[in-house]
Image (spheres, helix red, strand yellow):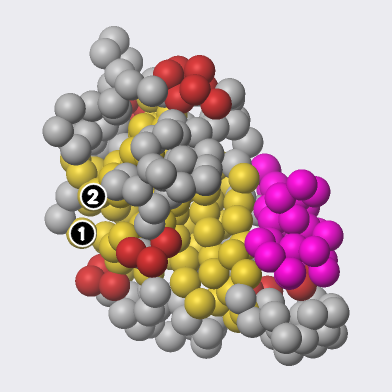
Amino acid sequence: MKPLSGVKRKMALGATTLAAIAVSAVPGPAWSATGRAQGGSDHWGVITRNTIGSPVAALRNGPFGSFGVTGPSARPPYGTGSLGIEVADNSTSLTPPSEKVDFGNEVDFYGNPVLGLTKVGFHVFQTAENTSHGGPTNMPNIRFEINPHLTAAPTVTYSSMVWLPPASPVTDRWSPYLDATTTGTWFLTGAAGTATGCNQSTPCTFPQLKTALNDGGQTPTIYTAAVGKGRDNLWAGAVDGLRINRNIYDFEAGGVRTLRAN
């Protein structure tokens, strides 16, 4: 495969306005199970234990474009920046040889109820090149590491809950909001996926996944929340406006800003 872009794949710069969802600024806190504010932008970053190879997940300005694109889709949906993500498909000595990265928060969502998730999604900057590398559904993911607390698998205390987005309706520009609760599919990794039937081979809709997790045991809880990519196809693009319930996380070059959806 060809290198993604020169010296550690740098990204460019841009400007934007608020769009799609009416929001108000929140000075940093994240959603919690009880609705109380906690944490802030300092808790967001690359989750190193979930990183394979030397991918990029970096807060950046822009992107703006592509060239010739004007209007709202030519700039990030919130603020002036986004989360730039780049992964390679064949750059490690492992099997498979592809890279993986998660950019997320290991503090503020800890202990929150999985079944309390009602709004999840993001905006994506998808390129035609990405679709040529892995098809139209070659997209980044939203991942929650969870304790599934399944009656059917009582000894299982860890699984990743992963959203597989649908194809972006546009390329080479910013997408509208992609709703993870009504589009695409979800799966659970490991024994939890086997027990629920919502695994990578047979992913479920979001309502089906919540029903499968609500099997009469303890309430399933969240460990972490993240946006990521891999291990599969080469991808280079950006994400902004990650929504988790009433909070929208605006990725900016200087940090992660929390907005409240009205």
Q: Which residue appears farthest toward the front when viewing the image?
A: 93
Q: Which of 97 and 220 is in front in this view?
A: 97
Amino acid at the residue labelled 2 = Leu
Q: Visible in this render: residue 25?
A: no
Res 29 label: none
Q: How far apart are marks 2 and 1 (CA)?
A: 7 Å
Q: Which residue is drawn at 33% across and 21% down?
A: 2
Give yes or no for contact between labels 2 and 1 (Cβ–Cβ under 8 Å): yes
Residue 195 on image: x %, y %: 82, 69
**Where is the N terminus found, in terms of image quarters?**
top left
Res 255 label: 1
Res 59 label: 2
Work out whether 35 lies above or below 206: below
Instruction: Name the side, left or right, on which 218 lies relative to 131.
Output: right
Residue 95 on image: x %, y %: 52, 46
Instruction: Name the side, left or right, on which 89 lies relative to 63.
Output: right
Q: Which residue is drawn at 47% across and 66% down?
A: 225
Crowding near the residue tagged with mark 2, few <14, some 14–19, many ≥20 C-alpha atoms within 10 Å: many
Residue 248 on image: x %, y %: 41, 58
Q: Residue at x 49, y 22 (%)?
A: 133
Rendered image quadrant of residue 206 = bottom right
Crowding near the residue tagged with mark 1, few <14, some 14–19, many ≥20 C-alpha atoms within 10 Å: many
Q: Upstream in the sequence, badge 2 or badge 1?
A: 2
Tell me which segment is drawn in magenta: 182-211
Work out whether 35 lies above or below 258: below
Residue 188 on image: x %, y %: 68, 61
Tell me if residue 205 is in the magenta stretch: yes
